[in-house]
Image (spheres, grey):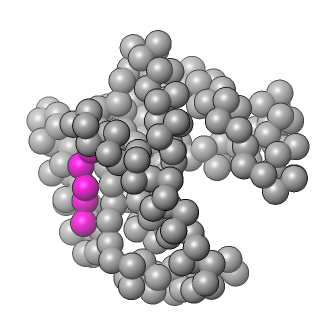
């Protein structure tokens, strides 16, 4: 099963991705983690990405797509994968669709984790990271909404978007996710 997880900062994507990856026995692919690993390994992709990262710029879509394409060659992706936080924009979604179409492995499901702004803000503040001040968090919410709304519409029109209420307990959210997956593919859950 090929899945994408999207949701605003603090929605619980990381927590639920780990569980879902184990539940479905598919790898959890975070482009941020993959970029950091490529830079650390000094691969060609890593060297290309490092210049942008060091300059405080976003890594261009074509480099990220090359990284994803390369990662999908790994044997652990043969039975599917869970992309966490990617794609982030409509353009990236279209590029990903083209890549997966070439590989004969289209997305089965896009799971959107949702929660109210106040709950998301509280979760992020409680997390206690240095970059999680209320002002910065509000900006991250704005950026997420501006970039992601067109993406959600795109996947909704393809009839593969399922919104999951992420405001409950971890177990409640997991059950909502499991049910959404079983509706999409009854043989899975």
Q: Is residue 22 left or right of residue 89?
A: left
Q: How many marks?
A: 0
Provide residue 3's location: percent of width, then percent of height. 36, 39
Residue for point 19% across, 60% down: 175
Above or below, 63 relative to 58: above
Above or below, 184 relative to 148: above
Q: Is residue 161 visible?
A: yes
Q: Is residue 65 left or right of residue 45?
A: left
In front here: 38 or 59?
Answer: 59
Quarter location, residue 133: bottom right
Residue for point 52% across, 36% down: 91
Above or below, 68 relative to 166: above
Residue for point 25% across, 75% down: 168
Provide residue 118's location: percent of width, then percent of height. 39, 85
In the rendered view of the protein, which quadrant contains the C terminus? top left
Q: Let me know if residue 162 is in the magenta part.
A: yes
In front here: 154 or 36?
Answer: 154
Look at the magenta stretch and give its main secondary structure. strand
Provide residue 181's location: percent of width, then percent of height. 21, 44
Q: Is residue 84 left or right of residue 140?
A: left
The magenta span reads 161-165
Q: Is residue 72 left or right of residue 54?
A: left
Residue for point 15% across, 51% down: 179
In front here: 75 or 133?
Answer: 133
In the rendered view of the protein, which quadrant contains the N terminus? top left
Above or below, 89 relative to 12: above
Q: Is residue 26 visible?
A: no
Quarter location, residue 187: top left
Q: Let me know if residue 130 is in the magenta part.
A: no
């Amino acid at each position: 099963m090929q899945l994408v997880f999207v949701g605003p900062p603090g929605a619980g994507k990381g927590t639920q991705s780990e569980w879902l990856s184990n539940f479905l026995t598919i790898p959890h692919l975070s482009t941020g983690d993959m970029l950091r690993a490529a830079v650390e390994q000094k691969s060609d992709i890593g060297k290309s990405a490092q210049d942008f990262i060091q300059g405080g710029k976003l890594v261009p879509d074509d480099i990220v797509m090359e990284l994803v394409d390369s990662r999908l060659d790994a044997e652990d992706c043969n039975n599917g994968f869970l992309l966490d936080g990617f794609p982030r924009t409509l353009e990236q979604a279209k590029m990903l669709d083209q890549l997966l179409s070439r590989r004969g492995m289209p997305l089965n499901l896009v799971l959107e984790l949702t929660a109210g702004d106040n709950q998301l803000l509280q979760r992020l503040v409680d997390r206690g990271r240095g970059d999680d001040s209320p002002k910065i968090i509000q900006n991250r919410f704005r950026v997420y909404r501006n970039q992601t709304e067109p993406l959600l519409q795109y996947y909704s029109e393809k009839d593969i978007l399922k919104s999951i209420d992420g405001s409950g307990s971890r177990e409640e959210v997991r059950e909502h996710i499991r049910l959404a997956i079983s509706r999409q593919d009854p043989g899975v859950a």
